[in-house]
């Protein structure tokens, strides 16, 4: 670690966090000890924190006070983490309907956050300083796994309006001090990409951070321009907020000459899991309990795919208890070779809306159609929108006109998977805009999300 990085991570950033009334430094240090604990020790810690969370919710959170009374649940009777399954799920619709009732009556300094979600309908929720501290600590710990730290030069390719709307003088000075440069992921024109690559080459960052779609897009453009960026000393590219595809990992790694570390979480659900250098996707078990459930809400064992449900143990001010993320994943029974005792996510298959429904009811991952288009060299970008069981639209950006033969090939490939009675409409467009958040989604199913 360089002298400047050491000054930032050991002195200035801790002062910054203390000024904001965050205890992220202490939490990170505790996490760097507990990450080596065995499963039994970690579960004991989880149960203790869970009892505290549920007791607080029962006493101070109107929504849960009423719910617990209605179902006859008493927090003081908790004996096992499995007792958690007696509490009904929390989902986005319940949060929208009960936003005020979900606030703790003794909460202070709550900050309002929102996420657009897959439907585009905003989800507004609140986060207290304890929750922020724990999320910062979890991300910080995972960053240090890769031999980089706060204060090392960093390029962030991001698109969230929350980040981009606060670029005031204080934020600009803080980013300069901490050697972080934010590049907006909303617009990816050739002029913008040229500017991005120039800034990356000038700054020579130790780490990149951003959406996998955005970083892989920058990497592909660098390759087409024969611009070398694998000699800058970049150690790791942290990607999050979207499904990471194998092709994206390979493209980012090859072009930038660095490892790729996948992260999984959200502004609502928190920092759920992060990949270590040995490849294990470690769950932040000190803060988050992960359940995998089927479509009927029944718990599934390790190794079976289902919806990821989380309980965030640092959310007393606005509890996220058995929160349905809408993501599909698989828990692992193995222990990572890195030696950490943190449990593992074996797979994160994507959001439920990344899946498609065939006419006969078969549910398949969007990759079934993505690969049809990815195999075509003329296709530069695409987006698949399943409007209904009868209609699927495809937007395509191509190097040259697709031609009738190629259009029919795409249609036949889609129909072979979705059903021969499906209408497949292919539209050639000049460009495909990212979502409002700056993310890019290859597949949107209005059938799977229903």
Image (tube, rainbow, N blue to C red):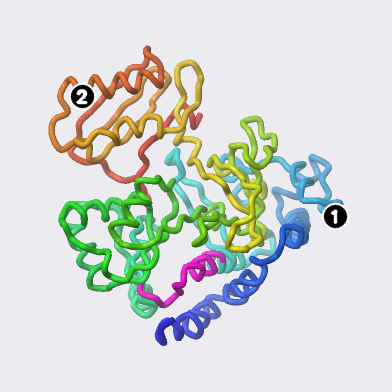
Residue at x-position 56% and y-position 69%: 137
Is 184 placed left or right of 151 in the picture? left
Viewer-closest of 70 and 200: 200
Residue at numbered disc 2: 406
**Percent position (x, y) of residue 428?**
20, 31
Residue drawn at the location 29% of the way across and 52% of the way down = 186
Question: Which is more N-terminal, label 2 or label 1?
Answer: 1
Secondary structure at badge 2 equals helix
Q: Is residue 140 magenta?
A: yes
From the top left corner, tell me how far across and down residue 250 is, in percent.
Answer: 35, 51
What distance separates the C-alpha of mark 1 from that of mark 2? 65 Å
- Decide if residue 168 is on the left or right side of residue 402: right
| Left or right of 371, for residue 144 | right
Whether residue 154 is visible here, answered yes or no, is yes
The residue that appears at 42% across and 48% down in the rendered structure is 244
Q: Nearer the viewer, residue 350 or 182?
A: 350
Does 131 sit left or right of 169 as displayed? right
Residue 97 appears in the figure? no
Quarter of the image where one finds residue 254: bottom left
Residue 221, compared with residue 306, is above or below; it is below
| Residue drawn at point x = 40 percent, y = 85 percent | 4
Q: Which residue is mark 1?
A: 76
Q: Quadrant of residue 304?
A: top right
- On screen, residue 398 above or below 155: above
**x%, y% of residue 53?**
73, 58
Q: Which is more foreground, mark 1 or mark 2?
A: 2
Residue 366 magenta-highlighted:
no
Dot 1 alpha-carbon crowd within 10 angstroms: few under 14, some 14 to 19, many 20 or more: few
**The N terminus sits in image quarter:** bottom left
Q: Which mark is residue 199?
A: none
Query: In the rendered structure, which segment of residues is drawn in magenta?
Result: 138-153
Q: Position of residue 427 (x, y in %)?
A: 23, 28
């Amino acid at each position: 670690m360089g002298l400047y990085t050491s000054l930032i991570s050991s002195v200035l950033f801790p002062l910054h966090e203390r000024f904001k009334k965050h205890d992220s430094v202490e939490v990170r240090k505790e996490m760097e000890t507990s990450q080596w604990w065995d499963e039994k020790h970690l579960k004991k810690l989880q149960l203790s924190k869970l009892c505290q969370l549920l007791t607080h919710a029962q006493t101070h959170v109107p929504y849960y006070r009423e719910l617990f009374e209605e179902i006859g649940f008493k927090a003081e009777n908790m004996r096992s983490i499995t007792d958690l399954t007696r509490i009904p799920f929390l989902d986005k619709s319940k949060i929208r309907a009960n936003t005020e009732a979900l606030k703790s009556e003794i909460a202070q300094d709550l900050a309002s956050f929102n996420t657009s979600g897959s439907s585009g309908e905003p989800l507004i929720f609140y986060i207290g300083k304890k929750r922020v501290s724990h999320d910062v600590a979890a991300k910080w710990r995972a960053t240090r796994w890769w031999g980089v730290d706060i204060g090392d030069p960093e390029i962030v390719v991001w698109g969230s309006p929350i980040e981009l709307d606060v670029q005031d003088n204080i934020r600009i000075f803080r980013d300069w001090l901490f050697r972080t440069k934010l590049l907006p992921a909303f617009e990816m024109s050739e002029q913008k990409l040229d500017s991005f690559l120039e800034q990356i080459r000038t700054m020579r960052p130790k780490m990149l951070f951003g959406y996998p779609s955005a970083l892989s897009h920058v990497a592909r453009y660098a390759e087409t321009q024969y611009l070398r960026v694998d000699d800058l000393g970049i150690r790791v590219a942290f990607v999050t907020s979207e499904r990471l595809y194998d092709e994206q990992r390979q493209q980012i790694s090859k072009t930038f000459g660095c490892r790729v570390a996948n992260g999984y979480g959200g502004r609502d659900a928190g920092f759920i899991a992060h990949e270590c250098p040995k490849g294990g996707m470690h769950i932040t078990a000190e803060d988050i309990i992960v359940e995998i459930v089927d479509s009927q809400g029944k718990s599934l064992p390790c190794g079976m795919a289902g919806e990821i449900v989380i309980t965030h143990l640092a959310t007393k001010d606005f509890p996220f208890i058995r929160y349905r993320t809408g993501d599909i994943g698989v828990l692992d029974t193995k222990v990572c070779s890195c030696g950490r005792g943190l449990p593992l996510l074996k797979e994160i298959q994507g959001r439920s809306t990344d899946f498609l429904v065939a006419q006969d009811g078969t549910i398949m991952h969007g990759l079934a159609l993505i690969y049809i288009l990815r195999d075509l060299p003329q296709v530069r970008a695409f987006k698949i929108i399943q409007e209904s069981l009868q209609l699927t639209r495809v937007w395509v950006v191509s190097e040259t006109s697709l031609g009738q033969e190629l259009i029919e090939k795409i249609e036949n490939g889609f129909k072979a998977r979705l059903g021969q009675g499906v209408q497949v409409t292919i539209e050639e467009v000049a460009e495909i805009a990212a979502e409002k958040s700056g993310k890019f989604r290859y597949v949107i199913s209005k059938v799977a999300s229903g």
